[in-house]
């Protein structure tokens, strides 16, 4: 039986090509790396119908990276959060030797062992650092999303369009040179794409809250609970890590705006239960009404106007109900 100390948690659903690439790139350098024997992948497949399961069952066993495939039982929660929790619980039970988990999504690629080895050094050097991520890029070289500061209520009131335009949730890095000249910066929230974390931190946090944050903001709520448990997060600078889904559309993309508002409202109800009523429901209703009016007046393309007006109509209609 293998005695790995790093469990790679891969949550997969109908991303066959991305799945092959994310596993294949690690497989390409693993035999020559110092991580051979230390890694074990746990792939949670939420019910793919695109050939992913067939490939994992029949062809992926030729890879150098050892892996375990788990699938949900009938009727089980198959959300992203539930998948991460299930795969992590399986990994911990099967491999008591684990000291770290590496959350590694299908749209990630790590091109050498160096980022993982450097993250291990940083985690080992900082007692209160519970998780370490990476500066990530897209395949074309453009930077990709790493994380964000903890959400602010005023930004929720303004809406994602203005927040993005004015860069109100951009990370203010505070780079420091650490051991072996590794550049590291603490960040409030580091997305799980990818993210290396200590087992103690995961256990202290209690995992993802799948009931309240099944998809959107699951990593933000988890980061806040991690901080409340006394742990911090951060990233190391690297150019060898990809976060790029190559425009693959997920099954919940059409409801992304509604999912975001529902989750963010739950976040503020949990962590700012009194202040949240300064913006919800009246201020948010006003914003959605203004957004809907702007779309009807300014958007010229008929199809785009119909799409956006439907989205903002739903937000306006469901705001009072907590976007349910």
Image: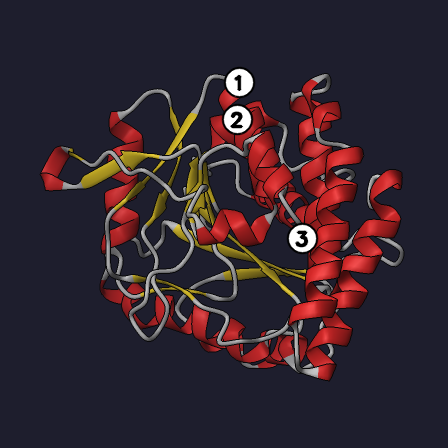
The relative height of residue 113 versus residue 275 in the rendered view (above or below) is below
Left or right of 269: which side holds 93? Answer: left
Number of residues whose C-alpha sits closer than 10 Å to that of mark 1, classed few (under 14), some (14–19) or many (20 or more): few
- The answer to which image quadrant residue 174 occupies is top left
Q: Are marks 1 and 2 in contact (CB under 8 Å)?
A: yes
Label 2 packing within 10 angstroms: few (<14), some (14-19), many (20+): many
User: What x and y, as percent, mark residue 181?
Assistant: 10, 40
Label 2, on which residue? 226
For disc 3, the marked residue is 80
Quarter assignment of residue 85: top right
What residue is shown with label 1? 229
CA separation, marks 3 and 1? 23 Å
- Secondary structure at badge 2 equals helix
Is residue 71 visible in the rendered image? The answer is no
Cα–Cα gap, marks 3 and 2: 18 Å
| Residue that appears at 75% across and 24% down | 277
Q: Residue at coordinates 79% horizontally, 52% vertically from top-left?
A: 315
Q: Position of residue 309 (x, y in %)?
A: 77, 66
Name the residue at the front extreme: 297
Q: Quadrant of residue 152?
A: top right
Compared with residue 20, is residue 238 higher up or lower down, i.e. above or below?
Answer: above
Along the viewing direction, whichever of 50 and 211 lies nearer the viewer: 211
- Residue 316, percent from left and from top: 82, 50
Work out how far the residue at label 1 is from the one at label 2, CA to CA, in angstroms.
5 Å
Find out whether the residues at labels 3 and 2 contact each other: C-beta distance under 8 Å. Answer: no
| Mark 3 / mark 1, whichever is N-terminal | 3
Q: Secondary structure at mark 1?
A: loop
């Amino acid at each position: 039986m293998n005695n790995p100390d790093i469990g790679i948690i891969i949550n997969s659903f109908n991303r066959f090509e991305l799945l092959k690439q994310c596993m294949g790139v690690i497989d390409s350098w693993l035999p020559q790396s110092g991580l051979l024997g230390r890694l074990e992948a746990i792939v949670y497949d939420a019910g793919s119908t695109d050939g992913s399961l067939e490939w994992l069952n029949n062809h992926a066993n030729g890879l150098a990276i050892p892996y375990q495939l788990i699938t949900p039982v009938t009727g089980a929660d198959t959300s992203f959060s539930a998948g991460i929790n299930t795969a992590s619980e399986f990994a911990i039970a099967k491999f008591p030797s684990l000291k770290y988990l590496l959350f590694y999504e299908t749209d990630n690629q790590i091109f050498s062992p160096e980022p993982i080895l450097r993250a291990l050094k940083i985690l080992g050097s900082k007692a209160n650092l519970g998780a370490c991520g990476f500066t990530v890029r897209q395949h074309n070289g453009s930077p990709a999303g790493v994380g964000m500061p903890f959400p602010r209520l005023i930004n929720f009131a303004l809406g994602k369009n203005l927040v993005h335009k004015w860069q109100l949730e951009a990370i203010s890095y505070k780079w420091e040179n650490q051991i072996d000249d590794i550049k590291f910066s603490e960040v409030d929230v580091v997305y799980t794409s990818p993210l290396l974390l200590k087992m103690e931190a995961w256990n202290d946090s209690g995992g993802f809250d799948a009931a309240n944050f099944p998809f959107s903001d699951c990593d933000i709520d988890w980061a806040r609970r991690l901080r409340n448990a006394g742990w911090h997060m951060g990233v190391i600078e690297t150019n060898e890590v990809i976060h790029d889904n190559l425009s693959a559309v997920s099954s919940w993309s059409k409801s992304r705006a509604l999912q975001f508002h529902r989750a963010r409202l739950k976040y503020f109800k949990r962590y700012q239960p009194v202040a949240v009523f300064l913006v919800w429901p009246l201020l948010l209703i006003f914003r959605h009404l203004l957004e809907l009016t702007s779309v009807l007046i300014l958007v010229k393309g008929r199809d785009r106007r119909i799409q956006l007006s439907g989205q903002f109509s739903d937000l306006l209609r469901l705001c009072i109900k907590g976007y349910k």
